[in-house]
Image (cartoon, rainbow, N blue to C red):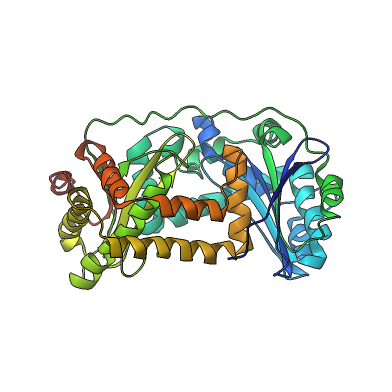
Amino acid sequence: MAKFKYQMTKLKNGLRVLLVPNKHVDSVETVVLFRVGSRCEDPKYAGISHFLEHMFFKGTKKRPTKGDITLEIDNVGGILNAFTSFEYTGYHVKVAKQHIDMANDVLSDMILYSKFVQAELDRERGVIKEEIKMYEDDPGSYVAQTYTSVLYGEQGLGRDIAGTFETVDNINRAQMVKYKEDYYSVANGLLAVVGNYDEKKILPLLNKYWGSLPAGKPSKFVKTDDNQSKPAVKVVYRDIQQANIILGWRSFPAFHPHHFVAELLSVVLGKGMSSRLFMKVREELGLCYVIGAGSDTYTDVGNFLVRTGTDPGKAGEALKMIVEECKQLKTKQVGLKEMKKIKEYWKGKMVLAMENIEFLANNVGMQELMFEKVISPEQMMVKIDEVTAGDIHALANEIFVTEKMNLAVVGPFKEDEGFKKLMKI
């Protein structure tokens, strides 16, 4: 892996800029991130962060229609997109290196000068409602939303990022403009540029297009109540052919001291086709097609989860096997051969990921935006090498406890009693 090189600097208006040069590609990605997401919202207007993200594509003073914005990027084969998460929102554009000036012109114009025309806003309500319906009709997506609601209830992290039909209808133009003014600022923003760019010209270019971003005030997150004293289960009935399951445990925030131990815990359990869950639940027992493990982490809380889909009649068996594999990690340490394998797996995946400039821009940008530091791939690999079998064993015993268990199931079930009986480890 090539040595990771980056520069942290600021524009004249104080906007943080993270520069990651890569002369081995012919493209460049610009990402602008803002430290605001669905957990920042008033519940009456849940979904406004996501709604606002949509509206930035609908026209500016310079580019009056949505077609004017997208056409410029399409004309050079570029990629323009955005996303909203619980804690931050991002807008990114990727183009061939010779079009970096135009790309930043378009992206900054969207963020700084969108018009939020009322007719477009009213039309987009329908689009967002269809998006909500799409995810509700997708059991794999809906079980994820159900799982977060089990963990966090009506708190920001427990609500659907897109909101509900009712809250989307509550949002008006004045609220949207104020929300942008409150959060889209230097205080909450970060630019990340990754790829093949002229290192002598990049800061003048960015100052030209982003220098008008207002100063603003930092966003604040309401602390999440993460207390739990007994297992929790939520079953949602759907007349479908598969039981979609997520079983998880409360754990800890992003970049907690145990972060890299948890990374390897997820690898040994459910990453790759030689992981324990894949070999046991899929290969040996034939109970599923897909199964995996990982962590969802935020600035103040986090959770460790396993997800799969199986025949409804075999859901109980699959759940028992998942719990049994987790229990094994509590009772017996991972052997030397398996420890070597899971570390090399993690490091290999990181090497591949870091060659993707979109991933790199979002990953390092998120670190600096949310935590004001960047852990380089080299530093991450050192941390991975430092993890011992004893660390994994200790973490498994800390996380995998009955009172922290949470289960979400979407499938043809009208009661949850059968699942409640299985909630112990």
Residue 317 to residue 216: above or below: below
| Residue depicted at x 43% and y 30% | 224
Of 312 and 188, which appears nearest the observer? 188
| Residue depicted at x 74% and y 56% | 66
Residue 28 to residue 159: above or below: below
Residue 282 rendering spot, x and y as whole percentages: 24, 69
Report whether residue 271 is seen.
no
Of 392 and 128, which appears nearest the observer? 392
Q: Is residue 314 left or right of residue 173?
A: left
Residue 245 rendering spot, x and y as whole percentages: 28, 55
Report whether residue 334 is seen.
yes
Residue 343 rendering spot, x and y as whole percentages: 40, 60
Residue 352 to residue 165: above or below: below
Residue 342 to residue 327: above or below: below
Q: Is residue 8 left or right of residue 113?
A: left
Q: Is residue 196 left or right of residue 401?
A: right
| Count of numbered labels shown in the rendering | 0
Q: Residue 314 appears in which quarter of the rendering?
A: bottom left
Q: Residue 283 appears in which quarter of the rendering?
A: bottom left
Residue 130 rendering spot, x and y as whole percentages: 51, 54
- Quarter containing the N terminus: bottom right
| Residue depicted at x 62% and y 41% | 369
Of 343 and 90, which appears nearest the observer? 343
